[in-house]
Amino acid sequence: MCSIIGYSGNENAAPVIVKGLRRMEYRGYDSVGVATESNNHIELKKGVGKVEVVNSKFQLDDLPGSIGIGHTRWATHGKVTDANAHPHPSNSGKIAIVHNGIIENFDELKENLKKDGYSFQSETDSEVIANLLQKNYENLNDVKNTMIKTVSELRGHYSFIAMFENGQLAAARYHEPLIIGIGKEKYFLSSDVLGFIEQTDDVIYIDNGNFVLIDQEKMQILDFDGNEIKPQITKVSKEFADVYKGDYAHFTLKEISEQSETIFKAGETTKDSIKKSSDYLKNAKNIYLTGSGTSHNASLVGKYLLSKYAKIKSESIIASEMPFSENIIEPNSLLIALSQSGESADVLEAVNIAKKSNCKIIAILNSLTSTLARESDCVIGMNCGPEIGVAATKSFTSQLIILYKIIQELSDEKMVIDFQEISSSISQILMEHNKIKKLANEIKDISDIYVLGRGIHYPIAIESALKIKELTYIHAEGIAGGELKHGPLALMDSSVFVIIINPGDSTYQDTLMSAREIKARGAKIIGISDKSSDVYDYWIQIPKTHELTFPISETIPIQLLSYYAALEKDTDPDYPRNLAKSVTVK
Ligand code: F6R
């Protein structure tokens, strides 16, 4: 969603904050702002656009002082305007806040504050926090008691940082991430370690329902009742620092290209968990898989793998549907939750629902320090390094590899899965990128693309359509091969492109037949297959391999096609419009 950052130290705060915001832009990037304190006075600059754009327009990093706060926004309440950008000052200008999350009772709080004479400059829910803090501070004259009173009045999911004109910082966490970075004579507050990782790897993860006070002398953590909490400092992996694009034009291209390597790391640092999770699976009464977006698509692959290779029945449920699927979870069952970030609000809610039914939770995730990791009984790490591009790419293939490792562990006479062969297939496909680039040029002006697959390739078709939508803004839909004649065939004419996922396995003949039916209606066919056919107008060859390699081999060319089509259409592949990397609100 949004990212928040705070800094109190011995350097100029604004450049440090701007640098941190650039790194956290994946969380939201429609507007940006910074406020700093100097000589007991708060100065603030903000505007619509990405960090680079707003900074060169307003020189955010020129703001004076060694204490400050910053924000990148992903709009929830109120349009994308300069006024709605954060930080928000209180009416007196003596307090400024940045906020991530949603204040559910903001309407009621706003009305009450208006009755007390407060006015509002934005349409956001966040601005009430600034004025509520001002009102409480004027009454209590003490930052600690002001925070206790304020958090007791707020409802919703939030983390916020408030800066007072005397240079004190105060920050609270309630169901949104908040992390302290501890450097030499300096403190950082941030939504993500990426906000400060270049400066320190000593961090404190703030627990839900706690708040932090930082002034020139000390840092204190307290619970919402005001009891002091003993800080627990952890070291984060330096690998987090690997968030540069290097020679790549975009993070998305870098992350697509890394997959021949990242697949080897999937599950590696949490090897015991693969064994533990297979024990859970063997003993579970019922098994469910859940996730959102790409992670849900991986869960659909998981369901196929479990039934085909381990003869285990399972159910895949979209995380956001869980609250509306009454009685779907049998008590004392097992839920496998997949999530790159481990912070998706929908996934956390699904986990919460399952836990209420006394289910065990296995988490397959990239961020081992995320909320989901802490909520789970067994954690399996993707270890694919930070994924900055908003569209999930390498995390998807890492999720599949972990699922492969689980079924390998479950199989009686240990299935042999050749991970080297999977990696070589990825490398081979990546070498074809010039051919895929040309195809991207052909599809750039098309308004509808369909992706068809059967069996285990159907979730890949859905995932492919999702990638095309996100990166190119072209309408795309995944179709289960057999469903073609039950409706989608009506859409086929010479104006559409259809990508046929057709590896030489048990789905091959039926899918080839579907391709012919489509071709007869005039649509252009892109075949993704290890076998050529006259039915394909364009053939993307994938290596002939073990059937388990196919889902990964099929995914890579479509990631590349979506990336290059985004370039053709002059959209930003790293930051698709209206989206954010981790969706921490419902
Ligand atoms: C798609 C995409 C999203 C995420 C979804 C879940 O490319 O990035 O659909 O997959 O928001 O995110 P995580 O996996 O972090 O829970």
Image (spheres, rainbow, N blue to C red):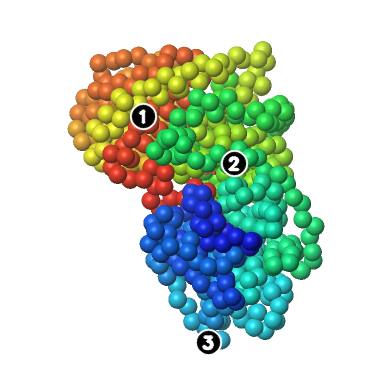
Using the image, tell me which numbered label, if any, was put on residue 240: 2
Q: CA distance from mark 1 to mark 2?
A: 37 Å
Of the two numbered discs 2 and 3 on the same chain, state the one appearing first in sequence: 3
- Image location of residue 308, percent across then percent down: 56, 21
Using the image, tell me which numbered label, if any, was put on residue 569: none
Q: Which residue is mark 3?
A: 117
Identified at 65% across, 73% down, the residue is: 150
Instruction: Assess disc 3: are there few (<14), some (14-19) or many (≥20) residues with their C-alpha within 10 Å of its C-alpha.
Output: few
- SS at mark 1 in the image: strand
Q: Is residue 583 left or right of residue 461?
A: right
- Image location of residue 250, percent across then percent down: 41, 39
Q: Which residue is mark 1?
A: 452
Instruction: Assess disc 1: are there few (<14), some (14-19) or many (≥20) residues with their C-alpha within 10 Å of its C-alpha.
Output: many
Identified at 63% across, 57% down, the residue is: 188
Instruction: Assess disc 2: are there few (<14), some (14-19) or many (≥20) residues with their C-alpha within 10 Å of its C-alpha.
Output: some
Instruction: Indicate whether 39 appears above or below 185.
Output: below
The amino acid sitting under disc 2 is Phe
The amino acid sitting under disc 3 is Gly
Instruction: Indicate whether 158 appears above or below 380.
Output: below
Quadrant of residue 524 within the rendered picture: top left
In depth, the one of 444 and 248 nearer the eye is: 248
Instruction: Indicate whether 421 appears above or below 202.
Output: above
